[in-house]
Image (cartoon, rainbow, N blue to C red):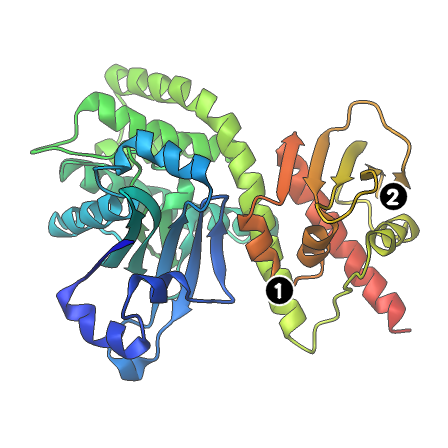
Amino acid sequence: MQQRLVVATEDRAWIEKYGWRSVEDVLACASEEVAAVSRTSDVVHVPIDAAMGGPGSVFVKRYLYHERSQRIKQMFRGTLFGKSRARIEYEFLQEMCSRQVPTVRPIAYGEIRKRGFLRESFIITEGMEGGQSLDIFAIHARRNRMLAHAAKMSLIRGLATIIRRMHDAGVQHGGLFWRNILVREQADGSYEFLMLDPDSGARLFASQVHLANVMQDLSAFVASAMALDVRGGLRSFMCAYYQVTRLTSQHRQMIARVVEHAHPLASQERRRMAVTEAIDWFRDRVKKTQRQSESMRTFASLDEFFDVLQSCESASGKVSKKKLTFQFSFSDSDQVHEKYQRFVVIESGRVTVSSARALKPDMVIHSDAKTWLALISGRADAYVRLRAGRLRMQGDTSLLPILVEYIDELSQLAASNVGK
């Protein structure tokens, strides 16, 4: 095994005090706060004791290629003799900092290889206290209707100004979706932004970013707005970006091209947003189960879960105004019996559960019993199961937030009934 660990000079003392003396130390770090998870990566938030002299918290993003197919895939992406994604991101963030672009400060990166094949890598960045990704911020704002018009305009103009500043500095982000922008509200009502996770398509220019590359960044940004069904504000955003009070015909042509390129990105981003909202919901459930004062129903079996759904028909009908059909398909590797399938129909605030096949489900969820029960019960081991790819979805994944909101409402109702 070959290891490489690079730590910024100013962070070496506290990193060693924390106990991160090797690549394995960082890869093995555990945290109850998972910011993101996928088949080959996860991001965890780690608080740091102020007495160590480091930042208040950091984010550790780990790339894990445990399967042979994953390592081969990475080889064809240039990692066999080239740089790991973690190293590329670390060096790009360093350059962004040197060009005065607001971004997360890179602290360290590390990687493990065997016979040249990249097996694992990570990057550590400084946390933004009180900040959250723009997509989660927007989801909460929409759900709670907490953003007044003046605040929305302040947010839009602030974003446009920062993005223009980044492009003027010669930095193309390459993946300027809302999940890659951190936002924090200031005491005066304004907003602070940091750019993170530059994509593999990120580029650096000696002067301003070229027009075609600007369009790529803005198309990703607009695609996120489309995915969240955020309407209005594009004109104000572009006026602030171009620093004009009125858009010219050339500006309007640019906007038309941006919107055209954003449309095909929006459908994929909409699926990502659904999963993002579900993970945010799950994080909230984990926190609630950790607080003794919170009443949250946990489930010991699939039968119990579906029985609760079937019986709690007094829940409000606000969650779904139309008929929605979800197919659940469970298959456990350690069991030999046939798959456990249920079809859940939500209509007018009521739910019907059946084992009989329904025609054309709107969404199909594939999992195993232990993973699903861990998710809906708010158990921390669900993160590991999610990362292992034990939850797969097909169909209209934009309906996932509706499903999890309904489950949340029903599980709380069931918990209150249990306590009676």
Establish if 133 lies above or below 293. Answer: above
Picture quadrant of residue 399: top right
**x 78%, y 23%: residue:** 360
Q: Disc 1 marks which amino acid?
A: Val
Q: Secondary structure at mark 2?
A: strand
Please state which of the two labelled residues, at mark 1 or mark 2, is closer to the viewer: 1
Picture quadrant of residue 214: top left
Mark 2 Cα within 10 Å, few/some/many (few <14, many 20+)?
many
Mark 1 Cα within 10 Å, few/some/many (few <14, many 20+)?
many
**x 90%, y 48%: residue:** 310
Q: Position of residue 12 (x, y in %)?
A: 19, 71
Establish if 137 lies above or below 413. Answer: above
Q: Position of residue 267 (x, y in %)?
A: 52, 26
Q: Disc 2 marks which amino acid?
A: Arg
Quarter of the image with the N terminus in it: bottom left
Front residue of 90/238: it is: 90
Establish if 51 lies above or below 45. Answer: below
Picture quadrant of residue 319: top right
Q: Residue 365 — which label?
A: none
Establish if 73 lies above or below 195. Answer: above
Q: Is residue 219 left or right of residue 326?
A: left
Q: Position of residue 391 (x, y in %)?
A: 63, 43
Name of the residue lying farthest toward the left: 206
Quarter of the image with the C terminus in it: bottom right
Disc 2 target residue: 350
Tell me if I can see residue 145 in this picture. no
Disc 1 target residue: 286
Q: Secondary structure at mark 1?
A: helix
**x 16%, y 30%: residue:** 209
**x 36%, y 59%: residue:** 60
Q: Earlier in the sequence, mark 1 or mark 2?
A: 1
Front residue of 323/53: it is: 53
